[in-house]
Amino acid sequence: MRAIWKGAVSFGLVSIAVKLYSATEEKDIRFHQVHRTDGGRIKYQRTCAIDGEAVSYDDIAKGYDIGGGEMVILTDEDFADLPLSTSRAIDVLEFVPAEQIDPMLFAKAYYLEPEGQAAKPYVLLRDALRDADRVAIVKIAIRQREQLATLRVRDDVLVLNTMLWPDEVRAPEFGFLDDEIETRPAELAMASSLIDSMAGDFQPDEFTDNYRSALQEVIDAKVEGREVVQPEEPEEAAPAAIDLMAALKASVERAKKARGEAEPEKPAKKAVKKATPAKKAAKSTTAAKKAATPRPAKATKKSA
């Protein structure tokens, strides 16, 4: 990894020299824009919209549009006197419980590595944070922009997470929030049952980017000159009207089946004994004999 920033963490009167490294990297497959017929790269020139001439980087300034076709132009001198904290310091402001920070505020993560003789104060801050079960709220200036951030411990390394400012998070303004929507206790119980049936421990390595893998397969096939055969996907039936309880119940059953949970066994039905052919024949013969044997006539009484 290559350090993108060098500075120091100001921890009270203690200064900890550190290097900053990007802790994450995007794995997206990137493409260049090319000419379809010959594969030539497409280039873009920086041109002025007024005179149409190409403009070099040295002649480019920052402009703020104030509307009505007017533009305020700012130069490097205008930015020099702004109240920006030093670009080489991470100022610790306070220590707070981690659960008080909304994950919505997190932006990008960086690793901090101690530099030179700063290993001991680095470890001291790391262990103190872990023992206190808190994170440090800090300010840092990266690329001429002051940012709020946190310092926390992960895998025995201090991690800096830059954060959005509170006014950069939009408020959800949706119509349904003003409606009084009630859920039935039976529906809530079934939804809770579904959550329980799908509960587990998060293991990041169990999940993969299937789209990126398929796209890489297409690229590899193009390079090797072979054809990519995609499996046929079954057509999904058009969704019918949703019966919420039925959908929840079916979801619970499917989740249990996916986790390998056996369904409760149904009680076995009592077997009905059937007569064997031999017994049937014996019964038929006995009945026939009884029918063929003449019954003795009943004696009549003589008249006196």
Image (cartoon, helix red, strand yellow):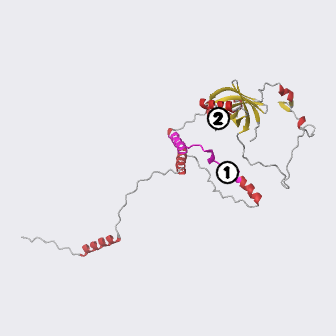
Indicate which label's residue lies in the foreground, 2 or 1: 2
> Relative to 75, is 161 on the left or the right?
left
Residue that badge 1 annotates: 210
Q: Which circle's residue, 2 or 1, is located before the other in the chain?
A: 2
Q: Quadrant of residue 137?
A: top right
Q: Position of residue 36 (x, y in %)?
A: 83, 54
Q: Residues within 10 Å of mark 2 (few under 14, many from 20)?
A: some
Residue that badge 2 annotates: 153
Residue 300 numbered mark, or none: none
Q: Given the image, on which type of amino acid does mark 1 rest?
A: Asn
Q: Main structural element of the magenta stretch: helix, strand or loop?
A: helix
Q: Position of residue 254 (x, y in %)?
A: 54, 50
As drawn, 260 above or below 7: below
Tell me what residue is drawn at x 35 percent, y 71 percent.
Answer: 277
The span shown in magenta is 186-214
Q: Given the image, on which type of amino acid does mark 2 rest?
A: Val
Q: Quadrant of residue 110?
A: top right
- Number of marks present in the image shown: 2
Is residue 74 in sight in this rendering?
Answer: no
Is residue 104 in sight in this rendering?
Answer: yes
Q: Position of residue 263 (x, y in %)?
A: 48, 51
Tell me what residue is drawn at x 25 percent, y 73 percent.
Answer: 290
The CA distance from mark 2 to mark 1 is: 31 Å
Element class at badge 1: helix
Tell me what residue is drawn at x 88 percent, y 43 percent.
Answer: 45
Q: Quadrant of the C terminus?
A: bottom left
**Closer to the camera, 197 or 83?**
83
Q: Quadrant of the N terminus?
A: top right
Label 2 with label 1: CB-CB less than 8 Å? no
Residue 155 among magenta residues: no
Element class at badge 2: strand
